[in-house]
Amino acid sequence: MTSANGEGDYRSTVRHLIDGQPEHLDVLQRVCRAAAEGVSASGAGICVMTADGTLGVSATSDEAIGRTEELQFVLGEGPCIDAFAARRPVLAANLADAANYRWPMYAPAAHDNGVRAVFAFPLQVGAARLGVMDIFRDRVGPLTEAELRMAFTFADVTVEMLLDTQEEKLKRDGNGTGLLDVGHRAELFQAQGMVMMQLGVSIAEALLRMRAYAYSENRRLEDVARDVVNRTLRLDGHKE
């Protein structure tokens, strides 16, 4: 049974908030709006890594936040870019403090747009980086412990949604089989076992790592599984 403040409750709350957003919105925009609501923020944005390795804005809670998010890529600096490069959260509870030493161009521009605090959370699984989720506030101050946990949960759920969306797109485009036949399933299970041993993780985590790698490399999951089984790919970075 999950405790009152356990991970299961946070995930349930996140899913409920996402499901409560207008259905006509894009799924990632629904996530952004739900994230802003869940952590009492003025807005949120999701930036994903494109096939050529660059970052770009994928979805935001509203147009105003979209303009603030895009400033980072126009100016070449900001919490999203730093979080992606460092592979760890960037928490700027007072954007004015970052103006002189951290983001001399972005911080004043975002401040002019009404932003006072920004919190950036990498979207990643193992070594595979998918992008960043940014949380914006119009007031100074840190996230509470509960809000931090909620933000991390939103980031985890966003990763799952990005992976699901990628696989569905490959199927629609005719580039993926969904691993429906017995041969592909057997190969996938074998690859999961090999990755589990390589990384020392659970079988479920091994599959998640493979899906994340496939997403970041814009490849089909079945092709990644085949390379793992054929020992031409290791997800721990070692060479055979």
Image (cartoon, rainbow, N blue to C red):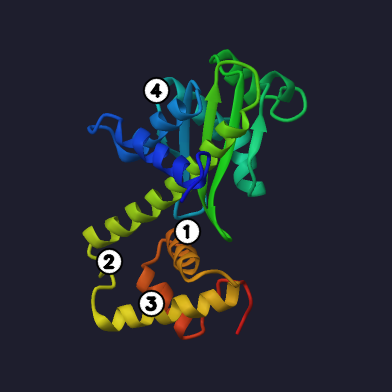
Q: Are marks 4 and 1 in contact (CB under 8 Å)?
A: no
Asked if 153 appears above or below 220 in the picture, the reply is above
How many marks the image carries: the answer is 4
Q: Which residue corresponds to mark 1? A: 216
Q: Relative to residue 93, is residue 184 drawn left or right? A: left
Q: Which residue corresponds to mark 3? A: 188
Amino acid at pointer 4: Glu
Q: Quick check: can you spot residue 167? A: yes
Q: CA distance from mark 4 to mark 3?
A: 41 Å
Q: Earlier in the sequence, mark 2 or mark 1?
A: 2
Q: Are marks 2 and 4 in contact (CB under 8 Å)?
A: no
What secondary structure is marked by label 4? helix
Q: Which residue corresponds to mark 2? A: 175
Q: Are marks 2 and 1 in contact (CB under 8 Å)?
A: no
Amino acid at pointer 1: Ser
Q: Residue at 53% of width from left, 53% of height from top?
A: 124
- In the image, which disc is placed on residue 63? 4
Q: Residue at 54% of width from left, 31% of height from top?
A: 74
Q: Are marks 4 and 3 in contact (CB under 8 Å)?
A: no
- For discs 3 and 1, the disc positioned in front in the rendered view: 3
Q: CA distance from mark 2 to mark 1?
A: 16 Å
Q: Residue at 42% of width from left, 76% of height from top?
A: 225
Q: Dividing the picture into quarters, in which one does residue 95 lie?
A: top right
Q: Earlier in the sequence, mark 3 or mark 1?
A: 3
Q: CA distance from mark 2 to mark 3?
A: 17 Å
Q: CA distance from mark 4 to mark 1?
A: 27 Å
Query: How far from the left and from the top, in percent, is residue 188?
Result: 38, 77
